[in-house]
Image (spheres, helix red, strand yellow):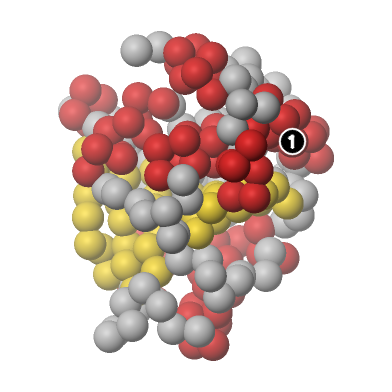
């Protein structure tokens, strides 16, 4: 199943070559998670409609629309690039055209990841290597502070996880690896083709 299939199904445009990105050491070029990878992930990892997912570096919103389509869950897209943010808003107009009930569950914010104020309702966080370990640390610390203020079960979903991210989570935080989802058709050639899900539970 090709990339264009889901874009057409969801009435969005996320398959075009990505040419714009923030020229900074700390913020990486935007690349959407392949639909095939998302299919594999959500065959093995299920979300609930009560979950509230935050996608850091959401770009044009592909993950947001895919999750809402599958699970009717609330998804918050954080995008610091104003051009991608505007394209996400345009995609949202197309997506909700025939899904009026979805409007209240999809949100996009144009801000830096570390400046996003974590809501006590946010409980799932998605990362496709959007920024440096320095920014990742700040974001995780914001999540941990939010957990202290409102304890709930929290999952971090990492696609193509960097060694820096993994080392930090396992050595410096209370997050524990709870699940690994391997992309079997790619993993043998590239061990980074996988998802890692880290959890922080109320009982931790």
Up the image or down, 109 lies above or below 42; here it is: below
Image point (43%, 60%), residue name = 50
Up the image or down, 137 lies above or below 113; here it is: below
- Would you identify the image quadrant in which residue 154 lies? bottom left
Quadrant of the drawing holding the C terminus: bottom left
Can I make out residue 67 in this image?
yes
Image point (54%, 36%), residue name = 65
Q: Nearer the viewer, residue 85 or 23?
A: 85
Q: How many marks?
A: 1
Up the image or down, 125 lies above or below 160; here it is: below
Up the image or down, 65 lies above or below 171; here it is: above
Can I make out residue 77 in this image?
no
Q: Residue 167: x percent and y percent?
A: 35, 64
Quadrant of the drawing holding the N terminus: top left
Q: Residue 11: x percent and y percent?
A: 60, 20
Q: Residue 118: x percent and y percent?
A: 61, 70
For label 1, the SS is helix
Image point (35%, 59%), residue name = 166
- Would you identify the image quadrant in which residue 51 lies? bottom left
Q: Residue 87: x percent and y percent?
A: 74, 30
Residue linked to disc 1: 89
């Amino acid at each position: 199943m090709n990339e264009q299939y889901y874009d057409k199904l969801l009435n969005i445009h996320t398959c075009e070559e990505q040419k714009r990105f923030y020229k900074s050491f700390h913020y990486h070029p935007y690349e959407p998670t392949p639909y095939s990878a998302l299919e594999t992930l959500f065959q093995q990892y299920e979300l609930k409609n009560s979950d509230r997912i935050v996608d850091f570096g959401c770009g044009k919103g592909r993950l947001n629309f895919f999750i809402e389509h599958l699970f009717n869950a609330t998804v918050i897209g954080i995008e610091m690039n104003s051009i991608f943010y505007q394209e996400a808003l345009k995609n949202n107009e197309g997506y909700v055209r025939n899904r009026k009930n979805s409007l209240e569950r999809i949100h996009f914010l144009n801000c830096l990841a570390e400046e996003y104020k974590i809501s006590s309702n946010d409980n799932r966080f998605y990362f496709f290597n959007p920024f440096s370990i320095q920014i990742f640390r700040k974001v995780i610390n914001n999540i941990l502070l939010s957990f202290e203020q409102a304890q709930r079960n929290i999952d971090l979903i990492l696609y193509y996880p960097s060694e820096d991210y993994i080392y930090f989570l396992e050595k410096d935080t209370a997050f524990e690896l709870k699940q690994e989802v391997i992309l079997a058709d790619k993993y043998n050639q590239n061990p980074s083709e996988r998802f890692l899900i880290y959890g922080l539970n109320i009982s931790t």
